Amino acid sequence: MATISIKNLVKEYGNVKAVKGISFDVKDGEFVALLGPSGCGKSSTMRTICGLEQITDGAIYFDDKRIDHLRPRDRNIAMSFETYALYPTLTVYENIAFPLRSANWSDQKVDEEVRDIAKRMELESILDRLPNELSGGQAQRVGLARALVRQKPNVFLLDEPISHLDTRQRHRMREFIKHLHLELGYTMVYVTHDQEEAMSMADRIVVMNEGTIRQIGTPDEVFNDPADDFVAGFVGEPPMNFIEGTIEQSDGRWDFKIKDQQFPLPEWVRAQGEKMPQQVKLGIRPFYIDINLSEDQPYDLSGEVFIVENMQDYTIVSVDTNDLRLQIVASGDFRAKRHQKVFLKFQPQFIRFFDLQTGKAIKSGEL
Amino acid sequence: MIELRNVTKRYGSTTLALRNVSFDIRDKEFLVIYGPAGAGKSTTLNLIAGIVQLTSGDILQNGESLVGVAPENRDMAMAFENYVLYSHLSVYENLAFPLKAKKFPKKEIDERIQKISRLLQISELLDRRPGFLSGGQRQRVALGRAIIRPATLYLLDEPIGHLDAKLRHRLRGDLKAMAMELNATFVMVTTASKEALAMGDRIAILRNGILEQIGTPEEIYHQPKNEFVASFVGEPPMSFLDVQPVQSDGKLIFRFEGCENSISISNRVAGCLNGSQTDFRLGVRSSELTISSQQDENHNTPAQVYVVEPLGYSNVITSKIGEGLVRVTVDSHIRPKVNETIWLSLDCDHLHVFYKEKAISHPIRNQNANH
């Protein structure tokens, strides 16, 4: 096991700057997810850590040793990729056994190890099959099993290893990989575009966009205190609602004003409001908006129901207000008709603000 | 109304795409056909449209057989996953294209385009060319072109299937709202369970050419007929536990596979058993039970925490009972440690019970939830 240190990493493909000088550390035994949309630079970063790509500038260290000039095989890494390249002429059993046989393991030890991993990956019934007889999901699990049988790698690198699986298998594998990490304690880097995967599995998440790092933090931190509106919008499903508006002060009241409606701001904004920019972008997650069919309760905004999606355990309500469409997550028994008038109350502790120009979060501590 | 009667479709001599499938499509409903790849979903749609011919059975429209009726005479419009917009034509001309091809009068074409573009919120884009649109706008235009032709029945084959998750999420609401405004019948094929739940007035679930269940989202979710339907709808997926019904001290209990723990069997569930000792499984959705750090009157089943997954709004805790894994959704501040013992509220009146993969008992639901 090892720590990983990425220092000012730059990766260019011709004129395209895929990674624009990023730095982050992975602690010994830590599980770090690189999260972002396609083209954000997460896979390029991963491929330089593996040694599949040369870096353009910067440095990569495992512990204190600089490794970015080493060949992949000299880096002592285990990896599993979205495009699983299994040996087509070998059975599943022999594919998984391959790295062990290369390391001159005895037949008996190979057999124990292969059967152990096959049991945990639910591959026991297909050990005799050839790769072309497998479904996409099965092949992906075999690729993962083969990466996992290798003993004591410095680091374990996974690039979208479960994206081909159906929902049920994906949940099983997610739980499996996370549990395995807890048991084996490998230093792990996991690339994904799926925010739920990153949230559910990683100790820390590196959120990337356009070749830069937007935030590094625990799942709690990126969810509750996003560094900017990109992170806020990317993490969480349904995504955070954003409302551009003006902060208005009159008669000791601090209000957030959008078009024809306004509502009082949370205490922390009022307490330090002098330094608050006048024009801001307010962010609120769908889960933290209360929705009512009557105006008896205090409310912040009123609007009209666009569509109700009853997911059974919960209900997603899309509401049109002030030329905006907001999404609210209500309880599973919430019912409303299209065009019905509804009243929204934002839970004040969950309101976030972002700078209109830079998108950076405006935090209470920094005011 | 469309009626499928014992519809079977064979491709070549071996591939049986649909096996004796019967169901109705009611007027003005939004029916979702949902299932994994190779289930026969697109085949069903193509048979209704008349693009492929059935091997046996019948399809009726308003009581009259459609066999032998050409696709263009069926008063249906069909849209596929991949529609390409003409890059040299404006949005308006792209939308007008299918109507011009059918020789609609100019005035009607214009009225139709205004209506559809208002519904899809693309009115401001009518003069632009596809190259100047965002991905989401392009998709909306493509969707508009698919449904621009007036019809009483629209057939949509994964209309938003290849988009990224965020865009899909937005467009499914737009699409459903538009369907409600058009006041027509919609049949949509999807492989996404969230889309099926969010959009369908009813959902037909297909697997390997067989209709597994058809019903409202509520029926499909809360009263799945078998383990396949149960596991294929809802996220996180339903957890399953192998159990054996046994007598213990004169009481009937379910003993969990791989450990000595058990739960008692209520009279209601006992009445659904058949004397068999094997092939029983319990099914539980992550929202259908709670956990406690201590044993109490509701939390009687010990389990070892396997993994804790934070999702922001909530956490999913997966714990082990013997060889089985159970997921529970809890508040985001509840975080037991791995391998810690927690207590689950497993109560057989609030579980799904399956025998040989068929459901024999469903949870008693809180009455409020039905209204």
Image (cartoon, coloured by chain):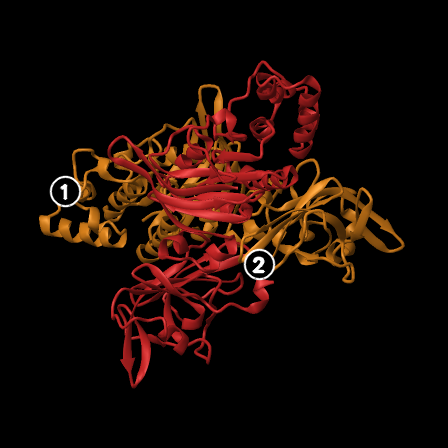
Chain colours: A orange, B red
Type of amino acid under label 1: Arg
Q: Which residue is mark 1?
A: A101
Q: Where is residue A248 drawn, in percent x and y?
A: 83, 47
Front residue of B177/A31: it is B177
Front residue of A291/A261: it is A291
On the picture, is B266 further left or further right than A323? left
Instruction: For marks 2 and 1, give the CA distance.
Output: 54 Å
From this view, report whether residue B22 is shown above or below residue B79: below
Q: Where is residue B200 drawn, in percent x and y?
A: 53, 46
Image mark for residue A332:
2
Q: Where is residue A154 drawn, in percent x and y?
A: 30, 45
Q: Are marks 2 and 1 in contact (CB under 8 Å)?
A: no
- Seen as rendered, the residue at the extreme bottom is B249
Q: Residues within 10 Å of mark 1 (few under 14, many from 20)?
A: some
Q: Quadrant of residue B124?
A: top right
- Seen as rendered, the residue at the extreme front is B64
